[in-house]
Amino acid sequence: MAWPIILGNITVPLLGAVDTAVVGHLPEPYYIGAVAIGAMLFNYIYHLFNCLRMGTTGPTAQARGAGDHAEVRMMIARALLLAGVLGAAVIALQLPIIRFALWLINASTQVEHYAREYFLIRVWAMPAVLGSYAIMGWLYGLRNVRTPLLIQVFVNILNIVLALLFVFVFHWDVPGVAAASLIAEYAGLLLGLYSVWRALRELPRENSSGKPTRLLDPVQLKRMVAINGDIVLRTVCVVSVLGFFMAKSAELGDVQLAANQVLHHFLIFTSYALDGVAYAAEAILGESVGRRDRAAFLRDKHVVFLWSGVVGVINITIYAVAGPAIIALMTSIPEVRAAAANYLWWPVLMPLASVWAYTYDGVYLAATRTRIMRNTVMASFVLFLIVLYTLMPLIGNAGLWIAVMGFLAGRGVLLHVFFPRVLRTI
């Protein structure tokens, strides 16, 4: 089950990587910097509301394991309703969001101009993105991994084709890149909704749990709000690290900002690959939780960590061998290539620090023990800030990378320490 999810998940950051690669072959580095800032804002928002996926898979798998098929149906309805409300809210607040973001980030005038253009076009895809998150989480909870893979591959192929067409044929530059992502995301949502309709038709009609279920059931809504609230607070810390990373990179100049944006995609691909294993953990271990089967839970946890180790080794090997070629593919600007090459070994080593963090996230979400997950991430974020403001004034960009590694390692260690508490509840 893990490999289709991993393959599907690593297609997600292709949207941002394609955007960077396309503008990376335009003549000025500020085009890359603009997409870096714009993509960072969307990463912040998307990660913030990734609770729609993270908070859907585990409860859906638990309901499926308990034979509560009516609750399985209600899970997707509630998640899509929440996605629509949140997506509309972000669109309504788009101008204050971009003004505040650009006020926080000390970027050049050209970077700010094109980042604003990129954001104000792509922001209209928010309902589609959040709706797709809900659909993916629900399908994973049903152990349907093939459909999300097909949807994600379709979205990325369409985005690549449209980005190349809009930038190099129509010469729309940065707005063309944003428009390509906008169209691709809505096409993916339509395909996802069709997949939900098919899956609902195949669900058993009987409900072995015997529990009555309503769309606006107060108990289930309270549980959803509690789970998603913990995930949102946890994710605020995660995406704030990404925000600090780009903001501090911008202070180092357009060339270093562009270089860090290129290398940032190495980290993103690693995180999404490991998240693929975590998603599989949520679905598989979630069913064990629904059945109250501790032995199966522990057995599957060991398998999940084995897969995570394999994925981490693969990432390290690819980046160590093909890193310079990947950098060259993403930008043709000599000074950006050189700056990125100087810090390539940081993303090469980063999987060593991140394997535990991402995999334990899946384990905790499967058990819906989100409060511990929230608290450990908040503690790790404090560690990140201490390291950042201690080392960056002394050693510059290297201090920034050390702070990111410390954040990931701290999350993994703390989640491991508190795991016995989770096990006692199953």
Image: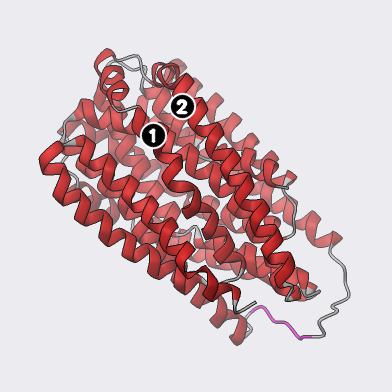
Rendering quarter of residue 392: top left
Per the rendered image, the range of residues in magenta is 211-215
Whether 113 is among the magenta residues is no
Q: Nearer the viewer, residue 360 or 113?
A: 360
Q: Position of residue 235 (x, y in %)?
A: 41, 60
Q: Position of residue 339 (x, y in %)?
A: 25, 22
Q: Tell me if I can see residue 352 in this picture.
A: yes
Side of 291 relative to 114 (left or right): right
- Disc 2 to disc 1, how far (Cα)? 8 Å
Residue at screen point 71% across, 60% down: 299
Residue at screen point 15% across, 37% down: 395
Side of 283 relative to 335 (left or right): right
Q: Position of residue 53 (x, y in %)?
A: 57, 59
Q: Which residue is mark 2?
A: 319
Vertical relation: 142 (above or below) 118: below
Residue at screen point 63% across, 38% down: 7
Q: How is the image coloured?
A: secondary structure
Q: What amino acid is found at the position of numbered circle 1 in the picture?
A: Pro
Rendering quarter of residue 349: top left
Q: Which residue is mark 1?
A: 347
Q: Are marks 2 and 1 in contact (CB under 8 Å)?
A: yes
- First of labels 2, 1 by sequence position: 2
